[in-house]
Image (cartoon, rainbow, N blue to C red):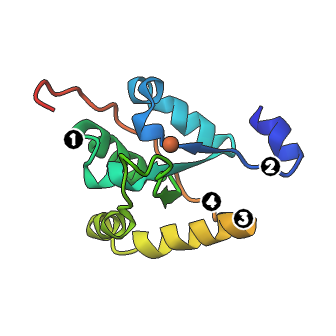
Amino acid sequence: MIFQLSCEGITPVIAHPERNAQIIAEPQRLYKFVDDGGLAQVTATSLVGAFGEQVQRTAKEFVKCGLVQVVASDAHTLKNRGFAMTKAYQVLNEMDSRYPERFATNARNLLNGDKIKARRIEVPRKQRKHWLS
Ligand SMILES: [Fe+2]
């Protein structure tokens, strides 16, 4: 499917893989998706921990592994979800001071239909479930 889309000039972007049960269980699925040419966006509130520790750990692991290229508000249900973009960029900066600019550039390129610079990607570690989170 990714190949067919790319032949038509379309790059699929998977939303919030850090909250996808199948990807959490088998994170190599996301690796394969990105390796095949797909992109992924992490939700800002996931990065700041609003969906719990496991989702936050998964989100950070995907960032570290280069498997998410943009951060987005995902604020499509405004009653229950706020914007956490500023905080999310702070988290990115705490992880690596190069991340905020990289993610902002990627978002701009995505919106403009420009190519997103390929980066080295790594297979993420599977996150363990914690009983208290
Ligand atoms: Fe969403």
The residue under label 2 is: 10
Number of numbered markers: 4
Q: Is residue 95 above or below residue 12?
A: below
Residue type at mark 2?
Ile
Of circles 4 and 3, which is in front?
A: 3
Of circles 1 and 3, which is in front?
A: 1
Label pair 2/1, CB-CB below 8 angstroms: no
Of circles 4 and 2, which is in front?
A: 2
User: How much space separates mark 3 and mark 2, taking CA atoms?
Assistant: 11 Å
**How far from the left and from the top, in percent, is residue 110?**
66, 63
User: How much space separates mark 1 and mark 4, taking CA atoms?
Assistant: 29 Å
User: Mark 3 falls on what kind of element?
Assistant: loop
Residue type at mark 3?
Lys
Q: Residues within 10 Å of mark 1 (few under 14, many from 20)?
A: some
Q: Residues within 10 Å of mark 2 (few under 14, many from 20)?
A: few
Residue type at mark 1?
Glu
Q: Which mark is residue 53?
A: 1
**How far from the left and from the top, in percent, is residue 77?**
46, 46
The residue under label 3 is: 115
Label pair 4/3, CB-CB below 8 angstroms: no
Whichever of callouts 2 and 1 sits on the residue coming sooner in the sequence is 2
Whichever of callouts 1 and 3 sits on the residue coming sooner in the sequence is 1
User: How much space separates mark 4 and mark 3, taking CA atoms?
Assistant: 9 Å
Q: Residue at x 34, y 52 (%)?
A: 45
Q: Is residue 112 left or right of residue 81?
A: right
Of circles 3 and 2, which is in front?
A: 2
Q: Which mark is residue 118?
A: 4
User: Mark 1 falls on what kind of element?
Assistant: helix
